[in-house]
Amino acid sequence: MAIKYELIKVCKQSGARLGKIHTPHGVIETPIFMPVGTQATVKAMTPEELKKIEAQIILSNTYHLYLRPGHKLVEKAGGLHKFMNWDKPILTDSGGFQVFSLGDLRKISEEGVEFRSHIDGSKHFLSPEKAIEIENSLGADIIMAFDECAPYPADRQYVKNSLERTTRWLKRCIDAHKYPERQALFGIIQGGMYKDLRHQSLNEILSFDLPGYAVGGLSVGEPKDLMYEVLEYTTPLMPKDKPRYLMGVGSPDCLIEGVIRGIDMFDCVHPTRIGRNGTAMTSIGRVVIKNAKYAEDFMPLDPNCDCYTCKSYSRAYIRHLFKAGEILASRLVTYHNLHFLLNLMKEIRQAIMEDRLLDYRREFFQKYGYTL
Ligand SMILES: CNc1nc2cc3nc[nH]c(=O)c3cc2[nH]1
């Protein structure tokens, strides 16, 4: 098996699980947050800095790397791990979602999707077979099936047709996959916000014996409570002995709520993207550092954080860097935000171990300013 999931403990207070995923590039402790490295780099971070903040697995995107520099080039370089000098686990998304959200989508058919590149407008075609060919060339430890993420909102018939095609595409992905013994192919459950369609997609996707499964079609603009509701009737029906991955999530509250509802893996561009724009996630809520009120604030970004950024620099200095357009500005806040989320996941794992995750949620929300 390309990966082995080890269930260590189920939290007595909630459906949360503590686990380990054993992969060819090392062990991942779950629940885990995966920093996003879309174009073979977690923007503004070096692999050494990612290791310093204990990132255990990072995500890269098939759509972007296929368009630039090309999957064949990455293969020639020895694969994505070698190309980007990252020797821990990597997960690649299949490109389906990016085509819908980024590319200039031309046409969806049973065969696949035709789109124009967001880089130079050139015409391309992605199919289950093509996506798997690219992911096999990149060499990630976990690869996602080529699926269709239905938009939100979407009517029932559209969502039903789309989930059924995603199931037919999954079969084609499995047949096209060249290295199942070293790259774990995850299926993706769709079904929009419809309980019966989620259960239909669950039955169809779980009928394929795969090393892990993702909950797709969420974090697409729906209210958070609706996402939580879908998880409540989806994750309990997923295998207990396989990792569960909620795609595209998320902010601190969504991570905690997702873990409570049985999710093991998360990814989101949020911490890195807002970090580059000068918004820091801190233990006392968000700090928008360009705000004039920080001009002479010589406190660290987060007084309760022990990361390099918070131990070495003041808010005034970091605000100055942003105002001056210095590259270091993005690097320092990105570093802190990733450390913040990775540390949040570490505290969540500790809370599960001690059967006090719901207490942890209440304390975190009070400090962070969320309402329960
Ligand atoms: C940022 N939100 C978000 N990122 C996603 C990526 C995805 N990939 C494949 N399939 C999905 O359904 C899917 C859903 C997603 N939601």
Image: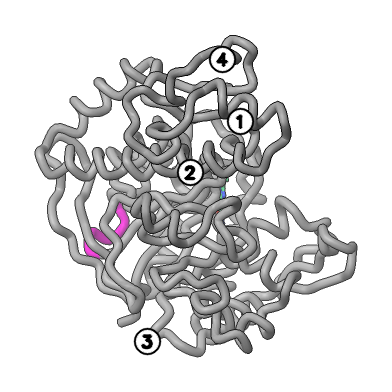
What's drawn in magenta, residue-wise? 237-241
Residue toward you, 323 or 336: 323
Could you give the CA–CA distance between mark 2 and mark 4, rounded to whole angstroms?
19 Å
Secondary element type, mark 4: helix
Circle 1 residue? 278
From the image, state whether disc 1 or disc 4 is nearer to you: 4
Q: Residues within 10 Å of mark 2 (few under 14, many from 20)?
A: many
The amino acid pointed to by label 3 is Glu
Measuring 20% from the left and 51% from the top, which residue is drawn there? 18
Q: Is residue 203 magenta?
A: no
Q: Residues within 10 Å of mark 3 (few under 14, many from 20)?
A: few
Mostly what secondary structure, the magenta segment? loop
Residue 223 percent across, percent down from the top left? 53, 29
The answer to which quarter of the image holds residue 173 is bottom right
In the image, residue 201 above or below residue 139? above
Mark toward the start of the polypeptide (3 vs 4): 3
Quarter in which the C terminus is drawn = top left
CB contact under 8 Å: marks 1 and 2: no
Residue toward you, 236 or 362: 362
Residue 204 percent across, percent down from the top left? 44, 66
Q: Is mark 4 within 8 Å of ligand 1?
A: no
The answer to which quarter of the image holds residue 119 is bottom right
Circle 3 residue? 181
Circle 2 residue? 335
Residue 302 percent across, percent down from the top left? 40, 25
Could you give the CA–CA distance between mark 1 and mark 4, rounded to whole angstroms?
12 Å
Residue 155 visible in image: no
Mark toward the start of the polypeptide (1 vs 4): 1
Circle 4 residue? 294
